[in-house]
Image (cartoon, grey):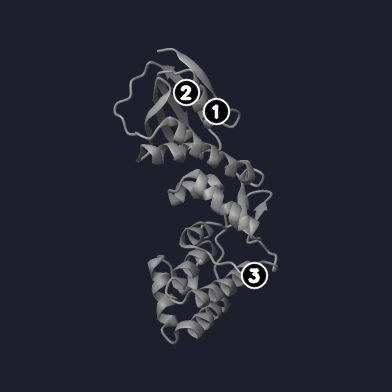
């Protein structure tokens, strides 16, 4: 089966390609690959009928792929879909894809490549930041060394979701871009930081704070005496989840964010 269309999705977005296939009422399979994943979008008379990407299938796979920044695509005519996993009208899918594209226009001003590395901002001007669990999960991977692509791989989230969260954290002043990836060095956190986190958590939940911190350290597979700095955000996330009152959780998170910047 001859390849009729191929190129880079950085130069021609998947949304534009799908609109073209739809307008031409084409039949076949659009195969897309990036550095760590492969996906397929099957069309029949231009209608999207099946999509698979990794363990995702159907609409979730389609939206995952529409969020890819980089990769290569190729289309083969007259390849039949192994099944039909999408029932939603293609016009509706493309409309949702257009909304995602609008978000990408803002995000790409900050994140133009999956090779970008973020670090915690050294600025102390960050206002109150109430981080959600998925934001803490991403923040926990920020060490001034990991690329966005590596964070995507480690967390198992799709590119769009990770990029959107990083964009929000950057816009809030919490993150800044590194010019060059730093050498991978595991710095051991000193006792002063643990004293600070224990002090602040005790203010919120009382004497159980020390036990909660020790259990969180153990769950992360580390010890207090040799705790690496690239897991400290994950530790803060774990212990902050033990705070029930949202206003107190926000206050604790803000204090610990400022402490993280000083490490």
Apparent side of residue 134 relative to residue 164 in the rendered image (left or right): left
Seen at 47% across and 72% down, the residue is 240
Residue 23, relative to residue 200: is it above or below? above
Camera-near label (3 vs 1) is 1
- Residue extending furthest toward the left: 83
Element type at marker 1? helix
State which quarter of the image contains the C terminus: bottom right
Residue at 49% from the left image edge and 47% from the top image edge? 152
Q: Residue at x 63, y 67 (%)?
A: 261
Q: State which quarter of the image contains the N terminus.
A: top left
Is 12 on the left or on the right of 206, as rendered? Answer: right
Q: Which residue is mark 2?
A: 22
Q: Horizontal and vertical percent for residue 56?
A: 36, 40
Mark 1 and mark 2 in contact (Cβ < 8 Å)? no
Could you tell me which secondary element the residue under label 2 belongs to?
helix
* Position of residue 11 measured from the top left corner of the image (x, y, whole percent): 61, 29
Label 3 residue SS? loop
State whether residue 186 appears in this view.
yes
Where does the image place residue 47, in percent across and percent down from the top left?
Answer: 41, 25
**Which is more N-terminal, label 1 or label 3?**
1
Can you say whether 42 is above or below 95 in the image?
above
Of callouts 2 and 1, the N-terminal one = 1
| Residue on which disc 1 sits | 16
Mark 2 neighbour class, 10 Å CA radius: few under 14, some 14 to 19, many 20 or more: many
Q: Which residue is mark 3?
A: 262
- How far, Cα to Cα, is label 3 from label 1? 45 Å
């Amino acid at each position: 089966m001859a390849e009729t269309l191929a190129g880079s999705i950085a130069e021609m977005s998947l949304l534009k390609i799908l609109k073209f296939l739809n307008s031409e009422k084409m039949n076949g399979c659009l195969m897309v690959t990036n550095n760590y994943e492969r996906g397929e979008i099957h069309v029949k008379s231009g209608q999207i009928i099946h999509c698979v990407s990794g363990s995702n299938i159907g609409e979730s796979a389609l939206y995952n792929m529409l969020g890819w920044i980089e990769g290569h695509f190729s289309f083969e005519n007259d390849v039949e879909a192994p099944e039909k996993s999408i029932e939603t009208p293609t016009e509706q899918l493309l409309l949702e894809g257009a909304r995602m594209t609008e978000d990408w226009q803002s995000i790409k001003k900050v994140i133009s490549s999956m090779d970008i590395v973020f670090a915690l901002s050294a600025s102390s001007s960050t206002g109150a930041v109430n981080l959600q669990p998925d934001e803490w999960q991403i923040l926990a991977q920020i060490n001034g060394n990991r690329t966005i692509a590596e964070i995507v791989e480690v967390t198992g989230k799709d590119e769009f979701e990770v990029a959107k969260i990083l964009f929000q954290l950057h816009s809030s002043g919490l993150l800044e871009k590194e010019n060059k990836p730093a050498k991978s060095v595991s710095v051991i956190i000193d006792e002063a930081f643990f004293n600070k986190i224990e002090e602040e958590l005790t203010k919120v939940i009382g004497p159980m704070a020390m036990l909660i911190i020790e259990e969180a350290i153990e769950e992360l597979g580390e010890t207090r005496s040799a705790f690496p700095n690239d897991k400290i955000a994950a530790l803060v996330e774990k212990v902050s989840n033990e705070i029930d009152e949202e206003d107190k959780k926000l206050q604790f998170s803000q204090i610990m964010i400022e402490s993280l910047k000083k490490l």
